[in-house]
Structure formats: structure tokens, C-alpha cells
Amino acid sequence: MDFTFSEDHAMFRDSVRGLLERECTPERVRTLWQPSDSPGSRVLWGKLAELGIFGMMAPENAGGLAMNEVDLVLPLIETGRAAFPGPVVECAAVAVPALRDLGDEALQELWLAGVASGDTILGFAHAANNLVADADVVDALLVGQGSELHLFPSDQLSLTHQPANDPGRRLFKVDVSSGSADTRIAGGQAASSLIADALDRGAFGTAAQLVGVAQQLVDIAVTYATQREQFGKPIGSFQAIKHALATVQVKIEFAKPLLYRAANSLATRADTRSADVSQAKAGAGEAATAAAKTSLQVHGAIGYTWECDLQIWMKRAWSLDLAWGSAAFHRGRVADAIIDGSSPARSFGFEAR
Amino acid sequence: MELSFSPQLQAFRAEARTWLDANVPDPALPSLDTAEGFALHRGWERKLNEGRWAMVPWPVEYGGRGANLIEWLVFEEEYYRAGAPLRVNQNGIFLLGPTLMEYGTPEQKARFLPKMASGEEIWAQGWSEPNAGSDMAAIRSTARREGDFFVLNGQKTWASRGAFADWLFGIFRTDPDSERHRGLTFILIPLDAPGVNVRPIAQLDGETGFAEVFFDEAKVHVENQLGDEGGGWKVAMATAGFERGLMLRSPARFQATAARLVELYREVGDSADPALRDAVGRAWTSAEAYCLNTYQTASRLIAGGSIGSEASLNKIFWSEMDVHMHETALSLLGARSQLLPHAPEAGNVGSWLDGFLFSLAGPIYAGTNEIQRNVIAERLLGLPR
Ligand SMILES: Cc1cc2nc3c(=O)[nH]c(=O)nc-3n(C[C@H](O)[C@H](O)[C@H](O)COP(=O)(O)OP(=O)(O)OC[C@H]3O[C@@H](n4cnc5c(N)ncnc54)[C@H](O)[C@@H]3O)c2cc1C
């Protein structure tokens, strides 16, 4: 029993954070809101790829690092903290392990080799998301369709952009009616289990980003509340402000261990992994949406403007909270697992009599 | 990261389970806030100590097993699984004990720890005074030095289990010219000393769960001073840190409540508001989050880390979770939840009402949650004072 991350994990997190603080600034994020700038997004994507994030979970013979969710979770939090644009979760945490698990070496060679270097971007369309985020930047989209898994190279995709609230996470309706035996990469039981795993991994990765988003929202509010003065003193000295932010920090702090445990459950394929992921996703979503509301309130009117960078993270909190299953969906899965399970529910370490 | 229990831990768990299954009193002991219940709980502490289960993390010389924090968590999981009695000496074993290990002289440790572990001496905590609650540095009770003795005057209040306890620890103003947190000294006081008067106070449930303690020229030997004279605040803060930190509310307590809540839902859920299903799931998740957070902290401490103001996050979390779980249980039971257990129609209401009332004290004692939010905002987030 050792619920800590290694020094290597911490060092890697720090280098991802350092890179994103330099490169993924709010100004940069705003320029990437324009769809015409997708070459710019490739440049940014490439910098993150240089650190080795995207191939982390790919097998070694496909240029990957054969790592797992425990290795990926801290970097993913950082991508949330930076509101990094693009399908990071869908590529690194969902599509890559799906192709790994599918085990088809020809497919791996074709699609995974370029992922590690950042040359290839993969996405994953799942029934949990009726619109697909960032589908315009992918080179190939894995699509879970009923009990089949398809892979569409981008030139076979038909996308309709759906303008939405979060300008940094563009949504698309994807027409998959061209799916055929050519695009089909798995069927039957194999496909069903890959698609179920995709939901768990997508929810997990999104939860990680939400934790980063939540912390960033609090940190921005703390900075603002320390500088902004009213009644002759910083607004951060008022207890109503302090307590609101402290309340959010408690939520964040207790979302984290659920997230880390979910990472471990996925990595070890624990039979509780789906419920563990759901606890993490619901907890992270609640922390992030609470952080968004509170951070806006702490900012007052300035936070309600387009100019204020707060919107970058607020809107990310809302869009990610509803991606890969809403908090309500995931709480439902948890309740099903603990209440309807035939055996007495088991909690971490504790076993009821 | 390794989240499985090693064979050694599993063996330790099995050993604890076997002993507890064989020894936990059945039926459960009467409330420890009665004279009879208190005596029976003291007897249970003696039995635990005979099995060397009273304080597993303590060194062997004081009756412990030198267990690490993870082993302690495992023991607690088994303790709550077995439905074992509340720890009547929790102020001693969880709060004063660790403080003594840090600040006590070798003589003090040898004098107090073994009797604490065996339940022979049960401790009450004396911080609060009528005019010093959240603002603990406002205390006025004094200790005047006369030769080898302190002479105590003043009043402490809300001392949990003070009505039946044997000893009290608290801070007293030893420097009459001092203000606030300076000039205070941490003193250990036998409650049967002449000049010490204990007056029980009935709590919300009608039982004498706490007491006020009056000091009228009460004499205590200076060897009962813990830490430096005038340095009592620092020692008291260490004790308060243990209270908010890892020991006082071990996760298994809430996991056991969450498991009972699931059982209750399975029994009565068909007729209950479907929204309560969500509340039960939330309660379960909260208990898991608290447990996992504690394992994280324990792992960090074992690896040489420390715990500071983060303890305030814990205190808010467990106390609010406990209230929420009990509110959910009462909603599931409906109007029947208000019945006392001996009411003819009470049926399976069990101890939920009792637990509900007690849960409401959680956000007040051990530093109110408002004070904890101040700490989080100022010390963790860095907001201006
Ligand atoms: C069941 C129970 C057991 C207890 N056991 C013990 C014990 O064994 N030993 C012991 O010494 N004490 C004990 N206490 C007392 C407890 O420590 C105090 O109740 C607590 O410190 C609060 O003090 P108070 O009750 O005087 O409330 P006050 O300090 O008067 O507070 C009243 C309200 O004002 C708020 N408030 C006060 N100051 C601030 C501030 N700066 N900012 C924001 N809000 C503020 C508080 O949060 C609270 O909501 C116990 C209390 C209970 C309920």
C-alpha cells in the first residue's frame, strides 16, 4: 500500500506545467479559437508531443512508452489547468489504448507510430457524446457504433460544425453513414468491451482535466481577490470571499484521491473500475462547476466580460462536465453499482459485515 | 502507487478481525455518557489493552505494536467492521498521547502513556472557557506558580466526557501580564484534586456528554507541566492538529455509516423519494473520497512528509459528510426517524437519530468550520488577513 506518486511522476508533471505556462498562454489559446488557425494548433500539439504525452500508453513496438493511466493522470491535470486545446484526452487516454488493446499490429503501425511524435492526432466518438469535440483536427476518428468499432481516416469524415459555448472546444456532428466493412476494425464482444473501456477512459481523462480546470479557476480568483480593492482593502480579506473559495478548495482536494484511485483501477483493470471512474468524474465535475460559479462571483462584472480570461476556464468546466457522461449520469452508475449489486457493497479497505 | 494490501497487511487484518470478533461486546454497550456506560467502556479499553490493540501505532513500551499509519487504518477498518464500542478515552489516546510523545519528558511518557492505553486514566480536554470559544487565545483561567506547584483558578467548559473522566489537560495563563497566545502553559490536572469542581452539562440528547470544570485555588505539581512554561500555545496547537488531522475521525467510521445507509436504502428504498438514491450514492462516494484521501496522507507521512493546514480541509469534509449521511438516513426513515429507540413503533430506526444529533456537533467542535475556512483561505490559498 503506497498511495503516492513517484519522483518521476512529479518531475514529469513539472515539466508539462512549465511548458504549458510558457506556450499555452491565454493569448495563444484565444488565437486558436479561430478555426483557420488549426496549423497553429498543430504547432502547440507538437510541443506537448515532444514531452512524450501522446504515446505514453502506446506499446513500445509502436513507438510508445507502454505506460498506463497512473503515469498519465498528472500530465492530464496540467492540460486542464492550461485549458490546452484539442482532443488530448480522446487521443492519449482513449484512442491509443483502444488500438493497443485491439492488438492489430498493422493498424498500430499505421496509426500509432505517428501519435507519439504528434504527427498523427486520433479522436474517439462515443455514444456518450452525441457531438464530437475537436473532430476537425484529427487524422482519424475511432467511432463506437452499436457493437462495432470503426476507424475513419479524416478524408472519409463528414463533419458539421456546431457553434457552442466553449470556443476552445469545437463540437461537430459526425456523419458516419459511410461506415462499411472497410472502416470496421472490431465487432461483437471485442468491440463492445473496447467501447465500454473507452467510456471509462474518456470519463477518467476528462475528470483529470476538470481537476486542473477547477484549481486554475480558484488560483485565478485568489490572485484577483488579492489585487482588487474595495472599501479600502483587498476583497480577498472579506470573509464571504474567503469562505466561498475555501469551500471550493475542499471539493477539489477530495476530488483528487477519487481521480488517482480511478487511474489505478484502470491501470490494474480492477473489476470496480467503472464505478471508480464514475465517482471521480462526478466529483471532478462538481468541483469544477462550483469553482466556475465561485470564481465568477469573486470577479464581479469584470468576470462577466469577453475580455476577461476567466471565461476560458469557466466554459471549459461546463463543457467538460457534460462530456463523457454528466455528473448525474455517473452518480447514477455509482448508485447502481452500490445499491443494486447483489453482494454487500465494498468500500476501499473497508468491508461491511 | 500500489493500492493493494500486501500479504503482511492482510495477515495483520486477519489477526485484528479474529480478536475483535471474539471480544467485541454483544449486545452493544450502553451509552458512554452515563455512569454505567462509562464504566463499561473503560472495561473495554482495558480489554483492548490486554490484547495490545488499544493503540496499535504506539511503541511497544507504551502498550502499542509500533504499527505504521497504514496498519492503523487497517485496524480501524476492522474495528468499525466489528461494530466495536466508541473510544471513551479518545481525548487521551488520539490527542494527548501523540502530544506527550512529542513534548513530554521521558518521565511523563512513562507516567501517563501506559495508564492512558489501559483506560485506567481517562482524559478530558480543557480548552474552551465561557468567553474563549473559537477565540481560544482569550482564555482567562490562571495558574500561579508557588514553589513546586501551580495554583489554578478559573473555569473551563464543554469538556467532553468531563463528567466521568479522571484527568483533564488544558492551557492556563501562567504570566498574568501576558496577552493572547503568549504566557500560556499546558498543564495536566487530576480531576479529583482539591479545589477542582466538575459540573455535568446535559447535551442536546439529554445525556451528560460534557461538563464545566471550576478551579478554586486548586494545586497541581509542576511536574504536570507539558512543554515549556509560557509555551503552552505551541503545544496546544500540536494537540489541535492531531484532532483535525488523521487520528480523530478515521475513515472506517464513515464507511461503516455509508454501508449502513446502503442497507437502509435496500430495506426502505422502494417507498422512498428516488432523489434519495442519489443522496445515498453521494454519501458512499464521500466516504470513499475521505478514505482515499486519508490513505494518501498516511502514505505521504510514512514517506517522511508532514501535515499542516491541510488538516482543516479534512475537518470540514468529514463533518459535513457526516451531517449529510445522517440527514439522508432520516429522510429515508421518514417521520419515524424522530422516534426514540424505545418508542413502540420505532422498529428499525436504530441509532440514526442519535447519530444525526451527534453529527451536528461536528461542524462546531475541534474548531468550527468557519474557523477552518479562515485557515484554508489564509494559509493554504494565501488570501490576505
Ligand atoms: C459536542 C461538543 C463537544 C465539545 N467538546 C469540547 C471539549 O472536550 N473540550 C473543549 O475545550 N471544548 C469542547 N467543545 C467546545 C468547542 O471547542 C467550541 O464550541 C468551539 O471552539 C466554538 O466555540 P463556541 O461554542 O464558544 O462558539 P463561538 O466561538 O462563540 O462561535 C459561534 C459562532 O460564531 C462563529 N465565529 C466565531 N468566530 C468567528 C470568526 N473569526 N470568523 C467566522 N465565524 C466565527 C463560529 O464559527 C460559530 O458559528 C465541544 C463542543 C461541542 C459542541
Image: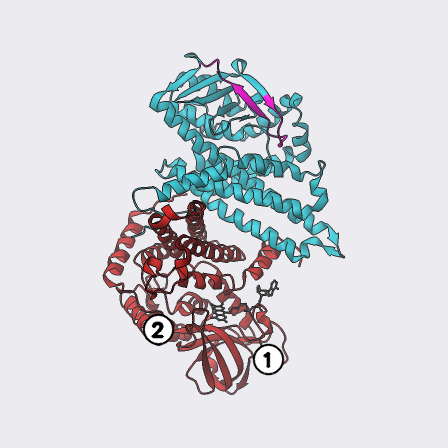
Chain colours: A cyan, B red
Q: Secondary structure at mark 2?
A: helix
Check residue A175 for magenta coloring: yes
Percent x, y for residue B284?
Answer: 41, 48
Q: Which residues are magenta?
A: A161-179
Residue that label 2 marks: B38
Q: Which residue is mark 1?
A: B175
| Residue A119 visible in the displayed image | no
Name the side, left or right, on which A309 lies relative to B274: right
Would the CB of label 2 be found within 8 Å of ligand 1? no
Q: CA distance from mark 2 to mark 1?
A: 37 Å
Q: Quadrant of residue B120?
A: bottom left
Q: Which residue ends up furthest to the left in the rendered image?
A: B22
Q: Quadrant of residue B205?
A: bottom left
Q: Are marks 2 and 1 on the same chain?
A: yes
Residue A237 at x, y percent in the picture: 68, 57
The amino acid type of the residue labelled 1 equals Asp
Residue A50 against residue A336 in the figure, above or below: above
Query: B237 or A117: which is nearer to us?
Result: B237
